[in-house]
């Protein structure tokens, strides 16, 4: 008896589906300007940050020593994927730390200038670690060593 009721119910559903009107999609086509993909801009980046001792830089990856940061620099001259892998590898062996958010650290010295894989100027900075007096770390930042600042001459009275 259950099988007969199941067949009757299925038959009624199929008959009901065949008798309803076909639904049309409510899509409205709007004429407008053609979609043009963005043009790749091959010009060098127009804004380059000039770094000076004492400036504050936002850093998320800090390394203990020059060897660790130089391994990341070598990867940075190859590709973005190589940089990610190198940072991860250095953090896994305890040579670098990757923070969840960037922190502001003061620049103590500018160690090296180089050009990264995307042909952007970059620098290796020696920074002071907050909360730990006398402890320094090494970071990479986009930009260059700033030109020497002119000192204002104070005139005597």
Image: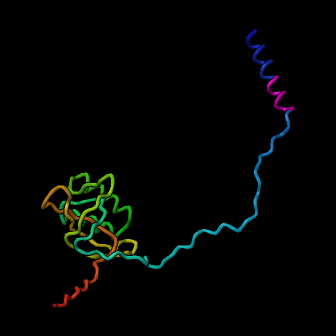
In reply to whether residue 14 is colored magenta, the answer given is yes
Please tell me in which quadrant of the rendered image residue 75 appears: bottom left
Residue that sits furthest to the front in the current view: 157
Magenta-drawn stretch, dominant element (helix, strand or loop): helix
In the rendering, at what x and y percent does residue 85 appear? 33, 58
User: Which of the two residues, 102 or 118, is positioned nearer the viewer here?
Assistant: 102
In reply to whether residue 18 is colored magenta, the answer given is yes
User: Which of the two residues, 40 or 148, is positioned nearer the viewer here?
Assistant: 148
Please tell me in which quadrant of the rendered image residue 118 appears: bottom left
Q: Residue at x 37, y 76 (%)?
A: 48
User: Which of the two residues, 112 or 86, is positioned nearer the viewer here?
Assistant: 112
In the rendering, at what x and y percent does residue 56 appear? 27, 67
Is 37 situated above or below 15?
Answer: below
Q: Residue at x 78, y 19 (%)?
A: 9
Q: Residue at x 76, y 57 (%)?
A: 29
Quadrant holding the C terminus: bottom left
Q: Is residue 12 left or right of residue 73?
A: right
Q: Which residues are magenta?
A: 12-19
Q: Residue at x 28, y 61 (%)?
A: 104
Quadrant holding the N terminus: top right
User: Which of the two residues, 94 or 128, is positioned nearer the viewer here?
Assistant: 128
In the rendering, at what x and y percent does residue 79 appear? 38, 66
Q: How many marks?
A: 0
Please tell me in which quadrant of the rendered image residue 140 appears: bottom left
């Amino acid at each position: 008896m259950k099988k007969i009721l199941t067949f009757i119910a299925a038959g009624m559903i199929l008959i009901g589906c065949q008798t309803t009107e076909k639904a049309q999609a409510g899509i409205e086509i709007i004429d407008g300007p053609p979609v043009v993909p963005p043009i790749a801009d091959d010009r060098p980046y127009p804004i380059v940050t000039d770094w000076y001792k004492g400036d504050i830089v936002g850093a998320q990856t800090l390394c203990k020593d020059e060897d660790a940061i130089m391994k990341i620099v070598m990867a940075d001259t190859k590709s973005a994927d190589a940089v990610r892998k190198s940072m991860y590898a250095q953090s896994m062996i305890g040579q670098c730390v990757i923070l969840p958010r960037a922190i502001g650290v003061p620049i103590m010295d500018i160690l090296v200038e180089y050009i990264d894989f995307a042909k952007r100027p970059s620098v290796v900075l020696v920074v002071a670690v907050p909360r730990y007096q006398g402890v320094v770390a090494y970071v990479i930042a986009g930009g260059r060593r700033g030109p020497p600042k002119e000192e204002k001459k104070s005139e005597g009275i």
